[in-house]
Image (cartoon, helix red, strand yellow):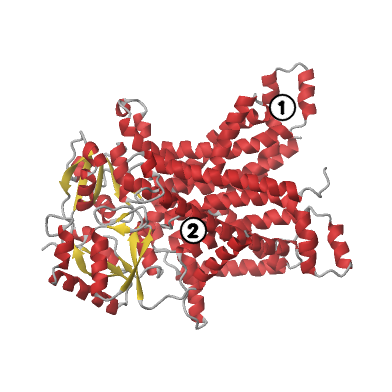
């Protein structure tokens, strides 16, 4: 017993006093499953398109990357509080976010679409969504979009998109607004197939939805930003980007 | 230990320090968001208080039979009540809440006709789940407290009432229960504050209480600390009001004796 | 996958992942609990002492911490405390330290436990007849020796029920760390549930594990209570 206590205390003290290593870069990812981009397995390891791409970029940039799973709705504060150095969690580059953090160039592009419960006739426009229950992920661009454009609807916030999907499946939501690719993966799953259908993309609003997805960085870190930008270019040029993507998507996820 | 005056010199210094701290926080920190979100904040506070009072009342009413069953009920009932209290007290409230909301949610679509039933409008909202879960939780902890309170009422009082030919139910209503509640008031104060501290968990199932409102403000404004400080202050004030209320109640019940 | 396969200890079963989460929860709870006892002992000693200022400061600490939800404290400690510490370290010209999820979790649990433990321990020491400690003083016993030869053994019987309750609170409070993304038992269960869509199964499994911890802890504390009260008078 005493030994165990000592070990636990020593572990605490050691983790308290561990100085930050200069060489490693801590990459913040979200804890929850976000297929097809990042999915945890029973070993606590993550896989998915975004994980593969990030690893390839780390290798190209000669960075020693260490993945740190963080609650998604606290991921920007975690970056600011220096718990992580880079956010690789499908974070859209928006004007609002650029006021507080920096972004790399985009590494993929995606749209926002609406998944709707089976048997409901809902179009992805404000008039059709009036009085309907829409689920969004807290802190996401989709939340901002819904609050701005669908203010006639009842908007429910979830900590993770996975939980919003689950509530759509349970029938407690009429629709959920989220990343088109994530919804596509959900609609192909066992639950998604029976519960809901894709109502299509919402009207573009660059100010809220941003222009593509980039790595989030703390302000004032130009070297790291440049390393990441060069690495994105180099894996695209070498064909590695296309090779990884073809395992997940049938189209060019980088966009135009 | 002698009572120290509120205006002892060191306390005056502490108060002055607190005042300076508050003032510097008010001046140096960013509070510009408060006006824009004042409606949301008030709405969130209201929902937190509604959840607290609703669950505390339902939970307390449930805790009376739970306590009674354990203190004086027949063995199977006592056993059931004890099992329920152990279950509630032995697991985290967050887990109970998720089990009820997401666990049940994953089963709902397989129940035929559920969406046409009269229950559906309730089942499709978040607040009934928060209400049920937190009420059961309060009942679980309260049941344990009430058990001790019922047992603590002197037997002589009950025997005297019995000897007077009082109906057992009248004894419970007129003597046993009031005496037990009187004994339990100080503990109940603590239980109620525990319950207040459990309410923000409902934000994790999409219930928009004050915690959820503050979380959204933090998301939208990217201000990390100020909203959190306001949140902590709000809970401090609510807990303070609860304690004051109980002090008033205790004084009253004591005066009546 | 069947229930057995889902809960299997070896991946792709999630049983092992849940047990790892349980172990992490217990480690955080234990470290936080012990640190909390330390804070509580110091707090109780100060509250019984003569220093008015220190006494008031301890009162402020116990009152505020016990009134603010643990969930809010976790956010404050997780984000604000490391920053405050690092600013202080920088001001002193020292290197920054990194406070990970584990350390932050332990700190929150310790902070909360310390506030409650202060009251439990103070109450238990107050229950000791003052004569016992005075006699020890007059024999010229060292204060430290008085503490572990007289105060500690005499207060344990009356403190144990409160302390056992606090341990259970500590184990359950670790669940709240799930909200900041620290993978303990509850978050592990949620990840398993989200990945497999078997929400009911995994949340229930986690509940059973917590319940087992409670039941086993109750037995251990009951044994300890029997042992420590052996020498005590039976009132």
In this image, C70 relative to B246: left or right? left
Residue under pointer 1: B175
Observer-nearest of B102 and B182: B102
Residue A65 visible within the image: yes
Question: Residue A154 at x, y = what percent?
Answer: 30, 43
The numbered disc on residue B244 is none
Q: Secondary structure at mark 1?
A: helix
Q: Residue at x 53, y 58 (%)?
A: C27
- Give the percent coordinates (x, y) of residue A253: 15, 59
Q: Nearer the viewer, mark 2 or mark 1?
A: 2
Q: Tell me whether marks 2 and 1 sit on the same chain.
A: no
Q: Chain of mark 1?
A: B
Q: Mark 2 sits on what residue?
A: C74
- Residue at image position (74%, 68%) is C51
Q: Residues within 10 Å of mark 2 (few under 14, many from 20)?
A: many
Give the left or right position of residue B164, taking residue A238 as reference.
right
Q: Secondary structure at mark 2?
A: helix
Q: Quadrant of the N terminus of chain B?
A: bottom right
């Amino acid at each position: 017993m005493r030994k165990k206590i000592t070990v636990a205390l020593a572990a605490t003290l050691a983790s308290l006093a561990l100085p930050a290593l200069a060489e490693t870069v801590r990459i913040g990812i979200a804890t929850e499953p976000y297929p097809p981009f990042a999915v945890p397995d029973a070993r606590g390891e993550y896989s998915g398109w975004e994980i593969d791409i990030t690893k390839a970029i780390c290798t190209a940039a000669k960075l020693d990357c260490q993945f740190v799973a963080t609650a998604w709705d606290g991921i920007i504060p975690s970056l600011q509080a220096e718990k992580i150095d880079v956010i690789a969690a499908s974070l859209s580059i928006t004007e609002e976010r650029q006021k507080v953090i920096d972004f790399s160039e985009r590494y993929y592009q995606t749209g926002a679409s609406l998944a709707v419960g089976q048997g409901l006739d809902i179009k992805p426009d404000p008039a059709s969504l009036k009085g309907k229950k829409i689920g969004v992920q807290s802190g996401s661009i989709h939340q901002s979009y819904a609050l701005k454009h669908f203010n006639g609807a009842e908007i429910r916030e979830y900590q993770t998109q996975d939980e919003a999907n689950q509530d759509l499946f349970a029938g407690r939501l009429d629709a959920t607004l989220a990343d088109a690719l994530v919804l596509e993966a959900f609609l192909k799953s066992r639950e998604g197939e029976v519960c809901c259908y894709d109502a299509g993309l919402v009207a573009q609003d660059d100010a809220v939805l941003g222009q593509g997805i980039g790595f989030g960085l703390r302000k004032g870190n130009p070297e790291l930003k440049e390393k990441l930008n060069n690495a994105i270019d180099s894996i695209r040029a070498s064909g590695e980007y296309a090779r990884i993507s073809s395992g997940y998507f049938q189209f060019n996820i980088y966009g135009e | 230990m002698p009572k120290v005056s509120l205006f002892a010199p060191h306390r005056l210094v502490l108060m002055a320090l607190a005042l300076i701290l508050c003032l510097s926080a008010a001046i140096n920190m960013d509070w510009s968001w408060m006006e824009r979100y004042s409606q949301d904040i008030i709405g969130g506070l209201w929902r937190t208080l509604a959840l607290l009072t609703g669950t505390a009342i339902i939970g307390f009413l449930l805790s009376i039979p739970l306590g009674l069953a354990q203190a004086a009920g027949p063995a199977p009932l006592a056993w059931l009540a004890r099992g329920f209290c152990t279950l509630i007290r032995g697991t985290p409230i967050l887990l109970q809440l998720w089990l009820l909301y997401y666990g049940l949610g994953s089963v709902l679509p397989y129940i035929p006709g559920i969406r046409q039933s009269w229950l559906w409008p309730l089942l499709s909202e978040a607040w009934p789940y928060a209400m049920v879960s937190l009420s059961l939780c309060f009942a679980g902890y309260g049941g344990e407290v009430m058990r001790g309170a019922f047992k603590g009422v002197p037997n002589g009082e009950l025997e005297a009432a019995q000897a007077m030919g009082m109906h057992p139910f009248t004894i419970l209503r007129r003597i046993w229960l009031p005496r037990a509640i009187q004994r339990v008031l100080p503990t109940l104060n603590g239980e109620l504050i525990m319950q207040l501290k459990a309410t923000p968990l409902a934000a994790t199932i999409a219930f928009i209480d004050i915690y959820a409102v503050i979380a959204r403000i933090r998301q939208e404004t990217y201000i990390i600390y100020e909203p959190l400080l306001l949140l902590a202050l709000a809970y401090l004030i609510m807990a303070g009001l609860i304690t004051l209320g109980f002090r008033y109640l205790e004084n009253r019940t004591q005066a009546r004796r | 996958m069947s229930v057995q396969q889902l809960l299997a200890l070896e991946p792709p079963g999630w049983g092992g992942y849940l047990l790892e989460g349980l172990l992490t929860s217990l480690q955080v709870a234990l470290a936080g609990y012990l640190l909390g006892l330390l804070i509580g002992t110091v707090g109780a000693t100060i509250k019984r002492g003569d220093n008015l200022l220190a006494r008031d400061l301890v009162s402020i600490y116990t009152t505020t911490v016990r009134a603010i939800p643990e969930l809010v404290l976790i956010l404050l400690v997780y984000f604000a405390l490391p920053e405050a510490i690092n600013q202080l370290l920088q001001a002193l010209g020292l290197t920054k330290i990194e406070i990970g999820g584990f350390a932050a979790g332990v700190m929150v649990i310790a902070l909360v436990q310390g506030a409650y433990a202060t009251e439990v321990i103070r109450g238990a020491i107050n229950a000791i007849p003052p004569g016992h400690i005075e006699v020890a003083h007059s024999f010229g016993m060292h204060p430290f020796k008085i503490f572990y030869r007289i105060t500690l053994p005499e207060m344990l019987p009356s403190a144990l029920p409160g302390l056992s309750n606090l341990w259970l609170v500590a184990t359950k409070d670790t669940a709240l760390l799930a909200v900041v993304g620290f993978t303990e038992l509850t978050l592990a269960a949620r990840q398993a549930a989200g990945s497999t869509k078997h929400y009911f199964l995994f949340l229930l499994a986690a509940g059973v594990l917590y319940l087992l911890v409670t039941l086993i802890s109750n037995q251990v504390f009951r044994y300890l209570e029997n042992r420590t009260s052996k020498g005590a008078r039976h009132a």
